[in-house]
Image (tube, grey):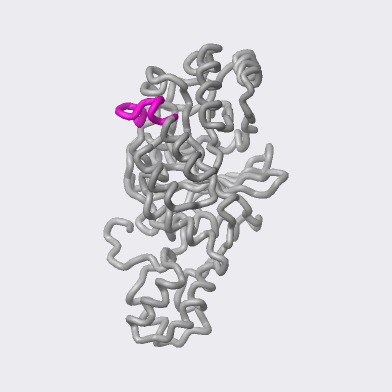
Amino acid sequence: MPKGETKPNIVSLLPAELEAELAALGEVKFRAAQIFQWLSRGVRDFGQMSNLPKALREKLDGRFSIHEPKVLSKQVSALDGTIKYLWELADGNAVETVVMRYKHGNTVCVSSQVGCRQGCAFCASTIGGLVRDLDAGEILDEVLFSQLDSGLSISNIVLMGIGEPLDNFDNVMRFLRLVNHPDGLNIGMRHISLSTCGLIERFPELAAQELQLTLSVSLHAPDDETRSKLMPANRGRGVDALIKACRDYYEQTGRRISFEYAMIDGVNDSPAQARLLAGHARAVAAHVNLIPLNHVEERPFRPSTPEHMKEFIRILEQQGVNITVRRRLGGDVDASCGQLRRKMQTKGGDKA
């Protein structure tokens, strides 16, 4: 819940919870389905819910908060049609959402927190630290209003924007149930990918949810020395513990894990590191997604050279690893997570 807000966000409630709230207000339960339908269409004004009695609309207004995110910035790539949004939230903070077009459908990349506490050395999102968690309704609104504003039907979701999803576990799990609900956006779990820097203590709890989503682990280095320099989350956990947690997750869920690996020149792109990465991937039957690094102005890192990239790929393929190289999208629209919000902060906007 945003700081200073005392009323719960009604968009975060599932239909059964809406029924319970209505019963507490002395109202009939069938109104819950009507309210959920209005919310799923993007209506963010109780006064516009025309099939509800006026007295009920007034009760809802007194009991719940409701807010439509405002577009602070919208960048559309001239190269590939990628759309990057900067949304203003109810408390004046801002988060980024990206809509990407692929042959298999449109994918939205959503943020789960305002800022991030994980401190990854190559990432713009963590500059300034964590401000607050997003509630489930705020994450849902990123999907819904990106779809409404762009006019594009969203079929896939990646939780790979600003923030660490497993650091906001309860709200993210609630968001997943909301976006998957058949009376809502009804986006299938198999079309959702959750990215984590490796908060392995949350893996058993995530596995227990029995969700059919894809778990993407931001590995970015196959050895402790390099990974701890790049990703503070590795300290106190370690690569070996992370690989074991991935193997346990895979065995418990049967869901194949993906390793995200940003190729950074002279840091994590050596032949020896390629061979070590291959061993980790084979140990958990993981798919490896190689990512050409998006340069962040405040960071010293540069993407791997084409020559290093080619040799790295050759070694992985030779070792029998299933890999893809992520196509760079939105290179002309502040493609790296956190860059657009960071620009706004340096101009005096955003409460972070």
- Residue drawn at (30%, 28%) of the image: 236
Q: Is residue 242 magenta?
A: yes
When the figure is inspected, residue 266 is found, relative to residue 254, above or below; the finding is above
When the figure is inspected, residue 115 is found, relative to residue 22, above or below; the finding is above
Nearest the eye: 343 or 94: 94
Q: Is residue 70 visible?
A: no
- Residue drawn at (65%, 55%) of the image: 152
Q: Is residue 341 magenta?
A: no
Dividing the picture into quarters, in which one does residue 101 lie?
Answer: top right
Q: Quadrant of the C terminus?
A: top left
Q: Position of residue 108 (x, y in %)?
A: 57, 48
Q: Quadrant of the N terminus?
A: bottom left
Q: Is residue 246 visible?
A: yes
Q: How many marks?
A: 0
Dividing the picture into quarters, in which one does residue 25 lie?
Answer: bottom left
In the visual, does 98 lie left or right of 307?
left
Nearest the eye: 300 or 347: 300
In the visual, does 205 lie left or right of 31?
left
Residue, far front? 251
When the figure is inspected, residue 287 is found, relative to residue 77, above or below; the finding is above
Q: Main secondary structure of the magenta part?
A: helix
Q: Which residues are magenta?
A: 233-243
Q: Position of residue 184 (x, y in %)?
A: 55, 66
Q: Position of residue 76 (x, y in %)?
A: 62, 44
Q: Position of residue 207 (x, y in %)?
A: 44, 47
When the figure is inspected, residue 86 is found, relative to residue 321, above or below; the finding is below
- Residue drawn at (48%, 76%) of the image: 35
In the visual, does 134 lie left or right of 275?
left
In the visual, does 2 lie left or right of 143?
left
